[in-house]
Amino acid sequence: MTSTALSAATAPVVSRRADRALWGLQILLALFYGVASAAPKLVAHSSATATFDAIGWGDWLMYLTGMLELAGAVGLLLPRLAALAALGLVGVMLGAEVFTWAFLNGGNWATPLIAAALLGTVAYGRRHTLTVPRRR
């Protein structure tokens, strides 16, 4: 493979303006998931424990969700992991949507869907990082 073909295969698929907008969105989402969402779960804040008590599956789910959100927040800030982290957090948000309807009577049902849409935007914009190396 020539160097021109190699650079074309690894070139970003978004413009410079879109790249900056994606980075801004990734930073905002990372702050949201790291500070506003994961931290209360990991320190067992009363707001988080009340929600997970209503679910009735024990504290392990709260801590697992907090760890997944924190890992996703960190991943959003790493160029090679941003798309994968966004996809992982979409999965967490889809799970949150299911639990919202199944255990929490549908309260705040739009929040996980809005977050999933924003994360989907990041995953789509960073999709070029999801390529698998070819075997020789």
Image (tube, helix red, strand yellow):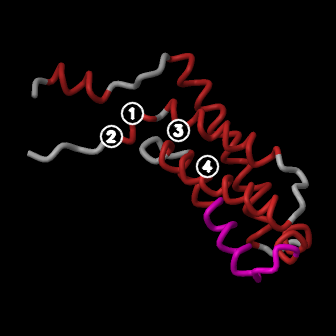
- Residue 30 part of the magenta segment: no
Vertical placement of 70 versus 49: above or below? Answer: above
User: Where does label 4 land, which residue?
Assistant: 90
| Place of residue 67 in the rendered image (x, y in percent of width and height, measured from the top left) | 63, 68
Q: CA distance from mark 4 to mark 3?
A: 9 Å
Residue 123 tag number: 3
| Place of residue 65 in the rendered image (x, y in percent of width and height, measured from the top left) | 68, 67
Q: Upstream in the sequence, badge 4 or badge 3?
A: 4
To which quarter of the image does residue 39 belong? bottom right
Q: CA distance from mark 2 to mark 3?
A: 12 Å
Q: Residue at x 77, y 58 (%)?
A: 37
To which quarter of the image does residue 96 belong? bottom right
Q: CA distance from mark 1 to mark 3?
A: 9 Å
Residue 128 tag number: 1
Disc 2, disc 3: CB below 8 Å?
A: no
Disc 2, disc 1: CB below 8 Å?
A: yes
Q: Main secondary structure of the magenta part?
A: helix
Instruction: Find numbered disc 1 in the image and state the secondary structure of the residue it sits on.
Output: helix
Disc 4, disc 3: CB below 8 Å?
A: yes
Which sits in the foreground, 60 or 110? 110
Residue 131 tag number: 2
Give the magenta-colored segment's residue range.
54-69
Q: Nearer the viewer, mark 1 or mark 4?
A: 4
Amino acid at the residue labelled 4: Val
Instruction: Find numbered disc 2 in the image and state the secondary structure of the residue it sits on.
Output: loop
Left or right of 108, for residue 131? left
- For label 2, count other residues whose C-alpha is less than 10 Å away and answer few (under 14), some (14-19) or many (20+): few
Q: CA distance from mark 1 to mark 4?
A: 18 Å
Q: Quadrant of the C terminus?
A: top left
Q: Upstream in the sequence, badge 1 or badge 4?
A: 4
Q: Upstream in the sequence, badge 2 or badge 3?
A: 3
Q: Residue at x 70, y 75 (%)?
A: 61
